[in-house]
Image (cartoon, helix red, strand yellow):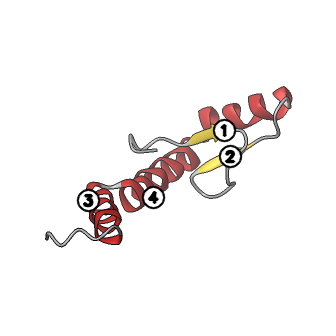
Amino acid sequence: MACGRAVVATAAENGKTRFVVPRGDNAQFVERLATLITNRELCCQMDEASRVKAEREFGLHRLVEETLNAYRQVGWKGL
């Protein structure tokens, strides 16, 4: 996702950034891959949505804030 690529995965949340297929459903897995290969517009839309989601949810700012909050919860009085 952080590389701005659509995702085909199992055991994950289904949404606009990825396709989710049931574990062991090889036919649907291949179908989803084929969809991304043949539908360039959809693939690009999912690429962009993945990058935006990764930046929003896993960006450096969030990492720093969550780390500092964890320290504060245990009594750290720094920043």
Disc nearest the viewer among 4 and 2: 4
What's the distance in space between the residues labelled 2 and 3, CA to CA?
30 Å
Q: Earlier in the sequence, mark 2 or mark 1?
A: 1
Label 2 vs 3, first from the N-terminus: 2
Which label sits on residue 64? 3
In which quarter of the view is residue 40 placed? top right
Specify the label residue 9 is tagged with.
Answer: 1
Q: Position of residue 27 (x, y in %)?
A: 85, 28
In terms of secondary structure, where does tag 4 sit? helix
Report the quarter where the C terminus lies: bottom left
Residue at image coords 14%, 69%? 78
Q: Is 61 positioned to the left or the right of 4 in the image?
A: left
Q: Is residue 7 left or right of residue 48?
A: right
Identify residue for label 4: 53
**Amino acid at pointer 1:** Ala
Residue 28 has which mark?
A: none
Structural distance between the alpha carbons of marks 1 and 3: 28 Å
Instruction: Please identify, in this view, whether the residue under mark 2 or under mark 1 is nearer the observer.
Output: 1
Query: Disc 2 marks which residue?
Result: 19
Query: CB atoms at circles 2 and 3 under 8 Å apart?
Result: no
The secondary element bearing badge 2 is classed as strand
Circle 2 packing at 10 Å, graded few (<14), some (14-19), many (20+), is: many
The answer to whether the residues at label 1 and label 3 have Cβ atoms under 8 Å apart is: no
Question: Is 60 in front, or is 77?
Answer: 77
**CB atoms at circles 2 and 1 under 8 Å apart?**
yes
Give how far apart the Cα atoms at labels 4 and 3 are.
Answer: 17 Å
| Amino acid residing under circle 3 | Val
